[in-house]
Amino acid sequence: MPGYYFKLIMQHNLSFVASTCSRGYSLCMAHFLLPLAIPLSILIELPLFEPHTPFSLSLCLSVSVRITLNTLTLNVKSDKVYTRHGVPISVTGIAQVKIQGQNKEMLATACQMFMGKSEAEVSNIALETLEGHQRAIIAHLTVEEIYQDRKKFSEQVFKVASSDLVNMGIGVVSYTLKDVHDDQDYLNSLGKARTAQVQKDARIGEAQYKRDAVIREAQAMQEKVSAQYLNEIEMAKAQRDYELKKASYDYEVNTKKAESEMAYQLQVAKTKQRIEEETMQVKVVERSQQIMLQEQEITRKEMELEATVKKPAEAERYRLERLAEAERAQLIMEAEAEAESIRMRGDAEAFALEAKGRAEAEQMAKKAEAFKQYGEGAMVDMLLEKLPLIAEEISRPLSKAQKVTMVSSGGGEVGAAKLTGEVLDIMTRLPAAVEKLTGINISQVGLSTRMG
């Protein structure tokens, strides 16, 4: 079995009264207490001596005593202990204790305290000590403090019990609060209130989390959109800078290229111009030579014409000029005669027209005098004379028509009757037209004439 054997070595000078036994030895019974208060009885067998003969014996004893160093598990239970506010509760704790064998002073103290005691007795002593401290600490705390802060309660019991048990050579390895309950349903009510509070806080927390999530999502979306727009802006700026620089570089390249091409073309043009100038010089020289040749040829031909053509031509020209002057004089005389003839015919026609006009004027004056004398009757008579002409002029367009299409929109007459009716309708409108033109109502004039 595990444990620690404490060896006691003692030396005593003992005086014995020997007695003889059947085996021929002297027997002596010694009774004494060891220094650790362990009663010891031994039977000493001695060589044969005379009975009742006093003698001295030097005895050396070696004694071994077992004490446990195992860890002891204690179930520390305190039933119906009143807390600081007078609420009875039951508390159960689990403690691990052991005799500290590593510390010689604590080991010696434990040997003095527990030598000769069983493991159960040692456990009971430690349990009673822990239970007393546990009850004392419960009495100084509230139910809420014990239930809600179990770590603090365990630390207080551990601290107080450790300082007390160390004086017995026992060390507290650990202490844990196992259970807290009551018979008044106090903890259950406290738990319900706490549960309701926790549920309330949970709902509030969930709502706040959802709200914060929505806010964070909106912020993230806003940041995303802002970042996207900023990125697009930067891309646009970069594209713009690229286009501007590219345009600038292209302009420089094109400018240099154009300058090079223009310089080349200018050089080509200058070369062509020099070639053309040289060519023109050659042509000028050639032309000058041709002109000189032509002048010489002209001079030769003039001299030839002078001899062969010019003089006869001058004679012919003189003759033709004389003939032309004679014809011109003849035409002038003929034109003057024709003009005089036309003037005389005009005078005759003018005199005839003047005489005709005077005759017509006299006739009109006589008609006016007659109209004045006969009044509206003469005018009606003149109008009646003109009516056939008016009817003829009205029907003239119809006489030239190759085809006439009559469209009836109601139940009236159709065909030739309709056409005749249209002509008569125009004729019936004639008095109104005459009245508008002359101010004379033909119908009334005829009626008044018949009545007169």
Image (cartoon, rainbow, N blue to C red):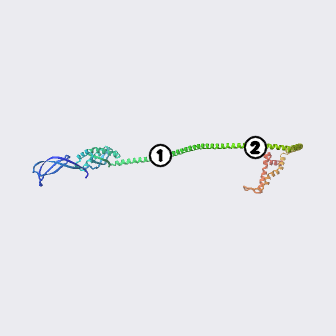
Labels 1, 2: front one? 2
Residue 151 shows in this picture? yes
Please state which amino acid type lies under the numbered disc 1.
Answer: Arg
Q: SS at mark 1?
A: helix
Q: Which mark is residue 72?
A: none
Q: CA distance from mark 1 to mark 2?
A: 98 Å
Residues marked 1 and 2 touching at CB (< 8 Å): no
Badge 2: residue crowd in 10 Å (few <14, some 14–19, many ≥20)? some
Expressed as whole percent of the image width and height from the top left, the position of residue 185 reads: 34, 49
Residue 258 vs residue 119: left or right? Answer: right
Expressed as whole percent of the image width and height from the top left, the position of residue 111 reads: 23, 47
Precedes in sequence: disc 1 or disc 2: 1
Rendered image quadrant of residue 407: bottom right
Q: SS at mark 2?
A: helix
Expressed as whole percent of the image width and height from the top left, the position of residue 212 reads: 46, 46
Badge 1: residue crowd in 10 Å (few <14, some 14–19, many ≥20)? some
Given residues 144 and 382, the one toward you in this image is: 144
Expressed as whole percent of the image width and height from the top left, the position of residue 83 reads: 31, 45
Q: Which mark is residue 216?
A: 1
Residue 332 shows in this picture? no
| Count of all numbered marks drawn on residues in the image | 2
Given residues 331 and 118, the one toward you in this image is: 331
Given residues 400 and 302, the one toward you in this image is: 302
Residue 233 vs residue 166: left or right? Answer: right
Rendered image quadrant of residue 136: top left
Please state which amino acid type lies under the numbered disc 2.
Answer: Arg
Residue 47 vs residue 87: left or right? Answer: left
Q: Residue furthest bottom?
A: 415
Q: Please give the residue where the numbered disc 2 appears in the rendered image.
A: 287
